[in-house]
Image (tube, rainbow, N blue to C red):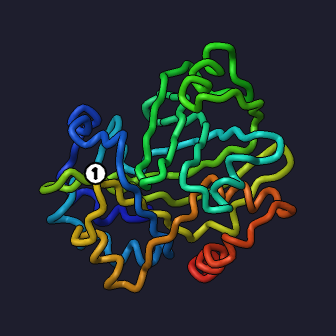
Amino acid sequence: MGFLDNFISDFEPISLQEMDTVALMKRIDTKFIFNRNILEKIFPLFLDQYKLLYVNGVVKSKYTSLYFDTDDFKFFLNHHNGRLDRSKVRFREYVDSEVCFLEVKRKNPKGKTIKKRIKVEKSSKTLNHAQKEFVHNRLKRDYELQYCHKNFFHRITMVNKFAKERITIDFDLEFQNDKETIRNQTKNIVIAELKQEKLNRTSFFYKLMKENGIRPSGMSKYCIGTSLLNEDLKANRFKKNFRILEKNNN
């Protein structure tokens, strides 16, 4: 029996088509990092509040992200240095549904995440002309972007039955570049992300995190992977996050 399989069949399902009502391409994201044992403990508590997304009959969907950055890691350092207006460029592959997008995610000075994307045939370590144009039009600036790294994970998506809110729960995290693959440092880690139109701390999920002593953590999977795979990069701002990772990976 796999991770969480004892509980999944009890949840009301929701399809990709039904998800359109909670697309939330402009939203507030709140992340939480904790151990998968905690997820097993609290997962049944979501039953009355949330539906589970099924994709081609699968709940624990496989995802792959391929990230780009400049040769001096400008996007990563903007995040590290606390710049409010920052960006990410990536291919996001939904493995089970065989769909791939090129995405540009921007966080504006008000803390809103704005995502724009175009469908592509497959991911690649290089951007073609049309893809470069899309990125340029979103960022309003030409960057010489290069492949940074890939990550792999499984995701469960929950949709609130009573509010415009989604939660993604990522686990089995793995990071890879051309030199190495890292999985042991994150094998027991769960990264949950609460996605809302505006921050609502009265959300059932938010309150449940607080009750279990889990505080919001702003570190992204991109920053985790970039730091782990490039140990010479400045990462002082993320020391607290790495302590959280180390504590919850045991």
Q: Quadrant of the N terminus?
A: bottom left
- Mark 1 lies on a secondary structure that is loop
Position in image of residue 86 (x %, y %): 58, 48
Along the horizontal axis of the image, is 131 left or right of 125? left
Q: Nearer the viewer, residue 136 or 176?
A: 136
Q: Which residue is located at x 43 percent, y 47 percent?
A: 113
Give the residue type at disc 1: Glu
Nearer to us in this view, 68 or 94: 68
Residue 89 placement: quadrant: top right
Residue 158, visible in the rendered structure: no
User: Badge 1 is on which residue?
Assistant: 197
Quadrant of the image for the C terminus? bottom right
The x and y percentages for residue 9 are 24, 56
Residue 107, position in %: x, y? 49, 48
Residue occupying the point 69% across, 38% down: 68
Residue that sits furthest to the top in the current view: 129
- In the picture shown, does residue 97 fall above or below 132? below
As drawn, 92 above or below 28: above
Q: Residue at x 69, y 52 (%)?
A: 76
Count neighbours of disc 1 (C-alpha within 10 A) and say few if under 14, some if 14 to 19, many if 20 or more. Answer: some
The residue depicted at 44 percent of the width and 61 percent of the height is: 2
Q: Position of residue 51 (x, y in %)?
A: 21, 53
- The answer to whether residue 244 of the structure is visible from this angle is yes
Q: How many marks?
A: 1
In the foreground, 46 or 8: 46
